[in-house]
Image: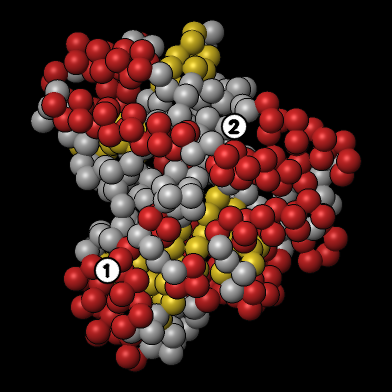
Amino acid sequence: MAPLDWIDAELAGLRQRDLLRELPAPFDLQTTTIEVAGRPLINFASNDYLGLAADPRLAAAAAEACHATGVGRGASPLVCGRSTIHAELERRLAEFEHAEAALLFPSGFAANAGIVPALADRGDAIFADAKNHASLIDGCRLSRAETHIYRHNDAAHLAELLATHAPQARRSLIATDTLFSMDGDVAPLVEIAALARRYDAMLLLDEAHATGVFGPHGRGLAEAASIEPDGAIRIGTMSKALGVAGGFVVGPQALVDYLANRARSYVFSTAQPASTAAAAIVALDVVVAEPQRRTQLLATAADLRERLQAAGWRTGDSASQIIPIEVGPAAEAVALSRRLRDAGFWVPAIRPPSVPPGESLLRLSLTANHTPAMIGALLAALGANHQDAKA
């Protein structure tokens, strides 16, 4: 048998369990309408929450920077990859987040996977939410610290684990998403921050899906919860509401200096293109100048959740622009996704390992550019075709 023949059996097993993922047709333009196999579909899968991914202002800034600095960077930031545009974006992110300093990473995944191991090692204890993003999970695994998983959004369980394990640890770190990417629900940040203070634990908040959307100024759920800017290590991404790509962390200058030395995904990764950083600067300007984008987005999400629930659909504890339609078995989620595609909508099924077995769902991801007509058409398709998937 050839060394890779076992892969065919693995793929067959995934297909049999309705867990096989196939690469979709390329989507050249990220808008609310995409084209699949020559057919336009209304897109309810994108994380482009503020509708900036195709904004011409961002494209113009990227083109200008590309002309001035070239396409690639050629090296990691510590060697020669960090440009004046990157430095300006870091300054602007720190200013936006009311922090002393910021550090850019190639992606949000790279930020989490590099920062957690830089903060915790053998002899330390990490306390992590059961439904954290895969990047935080992998960061915990890479850290070699003892990781304690608390029940999803259960501050009382977190308190029990802290009381038992934090006193024996050299250092303690609490790590949680603020807005959970599959269920669309929000972490109890006030209670978690209070526990971090009580047990002298570092607090790491992944604001990937909240930055630009929540808070009076769009800084995320930490701002909405009135958590002091220096009370948490805040990680974000520019690939969601900011419409670009790349990750970042904000916090005290000493933290940024330390991570620039110890976060391996920063030290050993080529810097992101300067054109991407230039577009992100413009996106920050839009977040500040056009708050109606996030208020409209959240109002649309609240209305859609209410109407889905009234029609009998299960949407869990969603309180955001991410709305799950809970189905259960993977095969049923795949079937529902296919029926919606036939009706003119792109809503991929979310299956294990993205969610636990038996908790497959369709994830509706709203943007500021979804119109009332699009929402109405989706509701009509769900109501007309899928009575069997209702609660």
From this view, report whether residue 216 is shown above or below residue 257. above
Q: Which of the 4 image quarters holds residue 147?
A: bottom left
Residue 82 spot, x, y in % from top left: 79, 58
Q: Which of the 4 image quarters holds residue 93?
A: bottom right
* Viewer-closest of 135 and 257: 257
* Viewer-closest of 245 and 355: 245
Amino acid type, label 1? Glu
Q: Is residue 281 left or right of residue 293?
A: right
- Residue drawn where x is 87% and y is 36% of the image: 67
* Label 2 with label 1: CB-CB less than 8 Å: no
From this view, report whether residue 317 is shown above or below residue 335. below
The tag on residue 191 is 1
The answer for how far apart the CA atoms under marks 2 and 1 are is 35 Å
Residue 282 spot, x, y in % from top left: 67, 40
Q: Is residue 139 left or right of residue 363?
A: right
Residue 213 spot, x, y in % from top left: 44, 43
- Residue drawn where x is 60% and y is 22% of the image: 29
**Callout 2: SS:** loop
- Residue drawn where x is 69% and y is 30% of the image: 57
The residue beneath circle 2 is: 53
From this view, report whether residue 69 is shown above or below residue 122. above
The tag on residue 174 is none
Total numbered labels placed on residues in the image = 2
* Viewer-closest of 253 and 112: 253
Q: Residues within 10 Å of mark 1 (few under 14, many from 20)?
A: some
Furthest toward the top, the residue is 38
